[in-house]
Image (cartoon, rainbow, N blue to C red):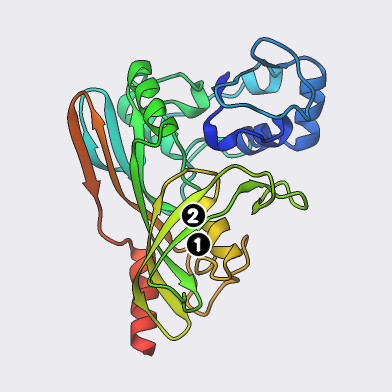
Amino acid sequence: MIITVEEKDEGTRLDIYLTDVLGFTRNKLQTAIKAGEVEVNKKVQKPSYLLKENDTITCEIKEFREIVIPAQNIPIDIVFENDDIIIVNKPSGMLTHPTTTEREGTLVNALLYRYGQNLSDVNGEFRRGIVHRLDRNTSGLLIVAKNNQAHKYIANLIREHKITKKYRAILKGRYPLDNDIIDLPIGRSPSNPVKMAVIPGGKDSITKLKVLEWFKDATYVELTLVTGRTHQIRVHTSFKGYPVFNDTLYGAGMAKVKTEEQVLQSYYLKFEYNSEIIEVEIEPDLKINKVLNYLRGRE
């Protein structure tokens, strides 16, 4: 398997990154890295190696090579498609791609059934077609590449921040400003490798926030990503004291109205492809509407 490191993952330890991507335990990956079964840019590195954007990771882990990713007839919502790319509305609760521990039920399993081998393989079999990811419990728009040329083109747009990405979210608490620009550096949490955090020396991270509706103890917002760090919206809003509703990882806790974790949706994409402006927008999903109905009814 070959993986190309994205900008948002720059500065992450090699072992932590692969734990997230592959699903192996960190101890198992450290052993594999030390045994030379993982190379970065064709060189063996330590588990503590800090990744750089565009690093190429090659995994030749025996247990990993034996894993087959099945094509599965899982319904997916295609909102745009041409000869080179697909834009999918990923539901909350679905993994973007398989890991070593979860090999079925992901978006990639569904894509393999529908498109077979007509998907990019820049990032290997586990991530066929996948140019960027959404967290399992974040729903919404995701760009998929049908071939390697399209994959590299979209990846370059992401790297150069030439794709407009907007999200809807409901925050816990009444946000004090109707418009805000959150400009805080993000890096791996020093106390918990699963989490990201606002830390000195982290990567520049900017989120634009616009209030859509206030409630007594919650706020419905639109968020535009200027940069695209891992968990950026969840980290920024949590640090400001207004975590995403039901985001238990970043401090919101599970509210009376329960959902599949964070109430966050990627709802708008705009970018240029082959001299064509592609602009896609979707309606609020069931999770957002469920919480909005609860909050409005309570008001």
Q: Quadrant of the N terminus?
A: top right
In the picture, measured across the screen, residue 15 lies left or right of residue 143, that is right
The answer to whether one can see residue 69 in this image is no
189, above or below 273, in the image: below
Direction left: furthest residue = 276
At horizontal 38% and vertical 79% (from top left) the residue drawn is 214
Q: Are marks 2 and 1 in contact (CB under 8 Å)?
A: yes
Residue placed under numbered mark 2 in the picture: 137
Q: Amino acid at mark 2?
A: Asn
* Closer to the camera in the image, 119 or 105: 119
Q: Dot 2 surroundings within 10 Å: few (below 14), some, or many (20 or more)?
A: many
Q: Secondary structure at mark 1?
A: loop
What percent of the width, then of the height, locates residue 186?
61, 48
Direction top: furthest residue = 42
The mark that comes first in sequence, 2 or 1, is 2
What percent of the width, then of the height, locates residue 133?
47, 39
At horizontal 77% and vertical 22% (from top left) the residue drawn is 32
Q: Secondary structure at mark 2?
A: loop
What percent of the width, then of the height, locates residue 176?
46, 76
Q: Dot 1 surroundings within 10 Å: few (below 14), some, or many (20 or more)?
A: many
* Closer to the camera in the image, 101 or 91: 91
Q: Gap in Å between the C-alphas at discs 2 and 1?
A: 6 Å
Q: Amino acid at mark 1?
A: Gln
What percent of the width, then of the height, locates residue 115?
31, 26
In the picture, measured across the screen, residue 152 lies left or right of residue 43, that is left
Q: Quadrant of the C terminus?
A: bottom left
At horizontal 45% and vertical 64% (from top left) the residue drawn is 263
The number of discs equals 2
Residue placed under numbered mark 1 in the picture: 262
Q: Specify the quadrant of the image occupied by residue 201.
A: top right
